[in-house]
Image (spheres, rainbow, N blue to C red):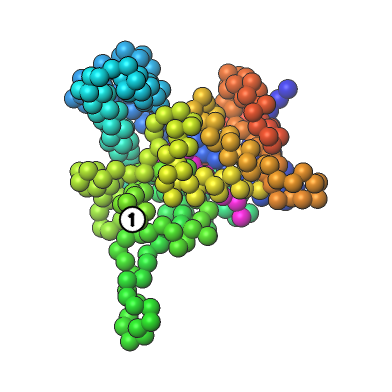
């Protein structure tokens, strides 16, 4: 049976007046440049850094999957705590886990295009055209990517969107004799009700200070330079990069920005289109959110629920994988040919 084309998916949803939502995985960034945005590229970077413990770890586990390595480290910590009194060994393993997370952030920053204008006008316009059907029809965009490609495109395009961040007033709102003063930082919270772009696993520009969730922005320097300054101060972005689906969900639910994004996904109605997201072994928390969105009243006249999921597949292997796990989804699952999607060019 032939797969649907992406254009047919979008036209069908608009014709049915179904609100379309988009879930982006790593394939979105890989489509821009597979030499940069892939597990292999990050793995190569880790091998180049001067950390023999991490290099040895990847060689022993024999994988390029960061999530799997972090899962192994977490399991090892639990075993040490249960069966050993060797506190130094436990400390070394925890240090390796922390070092891997930090190195992952550093690697993404190092491998990232230097700045927003590395993306050509044509590429930016193509990507904006890809995103517009969702934002123009009151849908949401969800991303599990850590990089700033999506952020850059939205910043340069004329698409109507909101990520929930804004500048708060620093003056006294009851003092009418002073001019309006806005904070230098972009805070998340007050604008969440109009948020349409959600980074489910965090992103490089988003930081949790412990008191506020803020977004790094341009202030004369390039965005990545500002992020690097924070990294050098020991500050790290909100970043879900470890563990299995349950551990990821636990991380998400203990951060108010991430939990808001996740609960928004769990509350969408209409239809969800996914691109570059393979629903792997450690992604069942995403499937749970999708299923929660579909568990509304089953009355045919009641439209306030998620009715269907359209999943893009690149290969026969991808197709077989989704067909094998399709029973895990509550809404109807339809596959489309991801190769028919033109995002960047």
Image quarter for residue 1? top right
- Report the magenta residues as a range: 138-147
Looking at the image, residue 318 lies above or below residue 130: above
Q: Is residue 232 visible?
A: yes
Crowd class of label 1 (few under 14; some 14 to 19; many from 20; radius 10 Å)? few
Farthest residue, direction bottom: 177
Where is residue 278 drawn, in percent x and y? 54, 28
Q: Which residue is at 38% across, 82% downward?
A: 174
Q: Which residue is at 28% across, 17% downward?
A: 84
**Residue 143 drawn in magenta:** yes
Q: Under tag 1, what secondary structure?
A: loop
**Residue 239 drawn in magenta:** no
Where is residue 44 drawn, in percent x and y? 30, 23
Most common SS among magenta residues: loop
User: 91 or 112, which lies in front?
Assistant: 91
Name the residue that disc number 1 marks.
Answer: 211
Image quarter for residue 69? top left
Q: Which residue is at 81% across, 50% downward?
A: 301
Relative to 170, 20 lies left or right: right
Looking at the image, residue 192 lies above or below residue 88: below
Farthest residue, direction right: 300
Where is residue 172 drawn, in percent x and y? 34, 77
């Amino acid at each position: 049976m032939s797969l649907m084309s992406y254009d047919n998916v979008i036209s069908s949803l608009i014709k049915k007046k179904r609100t379309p939502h988009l879930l982006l995985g790593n394939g979105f960034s890989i489509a821009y440049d597979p030499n940069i945005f892939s597990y292999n590229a990050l793995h190569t970077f880790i091998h180049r850094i001067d950390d023999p413990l991490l290099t040895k770890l990847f060689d022993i586990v024999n994988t390029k999957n960061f999530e799997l390595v972090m899962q192994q480290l977490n399991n090892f910590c639990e075993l040490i705590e249960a069966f050993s009194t060797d506190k130094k060994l436990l400390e070394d393993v925890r240090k390796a886990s922390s070092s891997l997370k930090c190195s992952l952030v550093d690697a993404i920053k190092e491998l990232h295009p230097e700045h927003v204008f590395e993306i050509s006008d044509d590429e930016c316009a193509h990507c904006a055209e890809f995103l517009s059907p969702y934002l123009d029809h009151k849908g949401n965009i969800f991303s599990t990517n850590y990089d700033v490609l999506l952020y850059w495109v939205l910043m340069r395009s004329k698409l109507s969107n909101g990520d929930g961040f804004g500048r708060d007033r620093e003056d006294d709102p009851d003092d009418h004799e002073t001019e309006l003063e806005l904070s230098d930082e972009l805070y998340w919270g007050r604008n969440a009700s109009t948020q349409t772009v959600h980074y489910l696993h965090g992103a490089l520009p988003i930081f949790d200070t412990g008191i506020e969730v803020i977004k790094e922005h341009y202030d004369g320097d390039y965005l990545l330079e500002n992020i690097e300054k924070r990294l050098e101060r020991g500050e790290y972005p909100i970043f879900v990069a470890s563990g299995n689906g349950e551990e990821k969900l636990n991380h998400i639910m203990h951060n108010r920005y991430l939990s808001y994004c996740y609960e928004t996904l769990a509350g969408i109605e209409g239809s969800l289109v996914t691109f570059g997201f393979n629903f792997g072994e450690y992604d069942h928390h995403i499937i749970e959110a999708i299923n929660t969105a579909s568990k509304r009243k089953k009355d045919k006249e009641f439209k306030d629920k998620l009715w269907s999921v359209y999943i893009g597949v690149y290969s026969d292997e991808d197709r077989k994988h989704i067909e094998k796990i399709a029973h895990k989804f509550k809404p109807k699952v339809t596959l489309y040919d991801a190769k028919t999607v033109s995002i960047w060019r």
